[in-house]
Image (cartoon, rainbow, N blue to C red):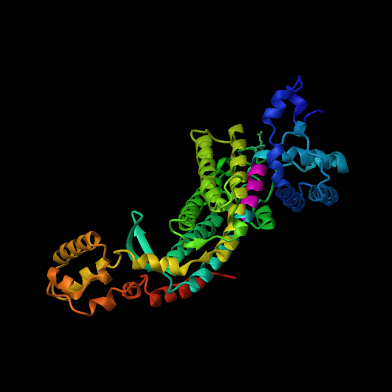
């Protein structure tokens, strides 16, 4: 098959080279965006008098026929035509004859592919924003059911202070809120049109770039044609936001794995989100959060892959830039799967409130509170810390928790102790005492959930 760019060549392309340089196996993902960009381009060429009305009508109807074939999967992609742009152009020419060859007037594949990816990522970003909200919604629901569910809060994975399970879950809500807002913010850099930048320097035809931008719904136009065709920052930004998002998912996943272990038994994931072992009949494995945790690796890898491809690339377009796609598509696919699984997995997770409660009854996570108590009784915090440290040591040696010690025992350590410490040391009192803004008291957590709801659009 002769190439659309074959005029200057005297030899056929080596078959291996054809295979190696072609991008059609993956850029066919942008088929619809490509046609959309072409439709906008041709309308604009007509309005600017570069093409006649008759030519515009013919090209438009040809493109629609091609689009329908793409949509109903009857379009035949060919490696010999290298990429999505030339596959579509060839199909158009076959459909409507040589006039189809006028479509490419005043543009290049360089501004074309950039346009396709801007359109594609803009759509995906909006899709992810709405999926993130669904996950946030599922967190809000679980949180609302667990405001008074108490579990140990950890630092260094050592029990620190008792907290509300809703408070713990809401921490993830805010991480997702930041991810969402990063995606929203990135839209203003994605929604910029490179179309009409030509190969690198603009075009000799009198075209109207803002018109194509307007038809395609872009917010702005690149002011520099070299930058327009060389910029892949918007993809890097997407990959970077995706990596941060997946890092958050991996932290949550890790906690779900830990919490569902026999040792913790804080939650049970629904059977439909777990798998069994081929040999050990008792096993119920948290495969989904394990895989989510692991998929963070490929998303990070895709970010580093593209950063490395772009490093030191001279202006303007270089074939290297074709390597921007597979990692991005893989990240899109991974995020889509991840987000769709997260909401139902969180919704169906069973919270074992009694087990969480048992944990806080069997630890020293109320120690800070008796230190604070001594401070309120007139001791300095350092002295109090020392005294309580000794009491904890005494408790460990005598296998007693702080609520099990008698007043006599307390008095041996400090005369400042009174009966009221027993009420104060109950996990619920300890939790509710942290009533500062953003703290774990039931009142603060309820306020926080209400505030969180104001960030959800739907
Ligand atoms: N398939 C190419 C890519 O993805 C499209 C742009 C090709 N431009 C070129 N001058 N060869 O980067």
In magenta stretch: residue 457: no
Residue 249, compared with residue 422, is above or below; it is above
Q: Quadrant of residue 14?
A: top right
Left or right position of 89 against 352:
right
* Quadrant of the picture in which ligand 1 is shown: top right
Left or right position of 313 against 162:
right
Residue 55, compared with residue 149, is above or below; it is above
| Quadrant housing the N terminus | top right
Q: Residue at x 65, y 39 (%)?
A: 110
Q: Nearer the viewer, residue 453 or 3?
A: 453
Main SS category, magenta section: helix
Stretch in magenta: 111-122
Q: Residue at x 50, y 73 (%)?
A: 145
Residue 208 point in image, percent of width and height:
67, 51
All told, the count of numbered labels is 0
Q: Quadrant of residue 424?
A: bottom left
In magenta stretch: residue 113: yes
The answer to whether one can see residue 127 in this image is: no
Q: Residue at x 62, y 40 (%)?
A: 326
């Amino acid at each position: 098959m002769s190439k659309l760019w074959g005029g200057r060549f005297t030899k056929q392309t080596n078959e291996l080279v054809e295979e190696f340089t072609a991008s059609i196996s993956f850029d066919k993902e942008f088929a619809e965006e490509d046609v959309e960009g072409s439709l906008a381009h041709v309308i604009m060429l007509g309005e600017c008098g570069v093409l006649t009305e008759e030519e515009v009508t013919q090209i438009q109807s040809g493109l629609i026929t091609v689009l329908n074939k793409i949509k109903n999967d009857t379009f035949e992609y060919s490696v010999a035509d290298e990429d999505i742009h030339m596959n579509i152009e060839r199909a158009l020419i076959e459909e409507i004859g040589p006039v189809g060859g006028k479509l490419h007037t005043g543009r290049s594949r360089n501004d074309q592919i950039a346009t396709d990816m801007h359109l594609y990522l803009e759509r995906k970003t909006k899709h992810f924003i709405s999926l993130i909200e669904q996950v946030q919604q599922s967190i809000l629901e679980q949180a609302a059911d667990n405001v008074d569910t108490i579990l140990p809060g950890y630092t260094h994975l050592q029990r620190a202070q008792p907290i509300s399970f809703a408070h713990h879950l809401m921490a993830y809500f805010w991480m997702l809120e930041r991810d969402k807002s990063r995606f929203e913010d990135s839209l203003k850099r994605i929604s910029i049109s490179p179309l009409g930048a030509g190969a690198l320097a603009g075009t000799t035809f009198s075209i109207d770039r803002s018109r194509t931008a307007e038809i395609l719904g872009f917010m702005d136009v690149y002011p520099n044609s070299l930058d327009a065709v060389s910029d892949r920052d918007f993809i890097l930004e997407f990959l970077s936001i995706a990596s941060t998002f997946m890092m958050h998912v991996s932290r949550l996943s890790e906690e779900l794995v830990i919490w569902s272990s026999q040792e913790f038994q804080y939650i049970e994931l629904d059977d439909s989100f777990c798998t069994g072992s081929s040999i050990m009949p008792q096993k119920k494995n948290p495969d989904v959060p394990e895989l989510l945790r692991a998929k963070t690796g490929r998303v990070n890898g895709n970010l580093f892959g593209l950063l490395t491809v772009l490093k030191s690339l001279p202006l303007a377009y270089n074939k290297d830039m074709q390597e921007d796609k597979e990692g991005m598509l893989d990240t899109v696919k991974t995020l889509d799967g991840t987000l769709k699984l997260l909401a139902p997995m969180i919704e169906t997770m069973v919270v074992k409130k009694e087990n969480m409660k048992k944990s806080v009854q069997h630890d020293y996570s109320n120690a800070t509170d008796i230190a604070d108590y001594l401070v309120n009784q007139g001791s300095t915090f350092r002295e109090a810390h020392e005294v309580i440290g000794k009491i904890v040591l005494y408790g460990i040696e005598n296998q007693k928790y702080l609520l099990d010690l008698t007043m006599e025992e307390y008095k041996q350590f400090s005369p400042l102790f009174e009966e009221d410490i027993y009420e104060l040391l109950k996990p619920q009192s300890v939790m509710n005492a942290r009533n500062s803004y953003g703290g774990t008291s039931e009142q603060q957590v309820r306020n926080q959930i209400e505030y969180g709801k104001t960030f959800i659009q739907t």
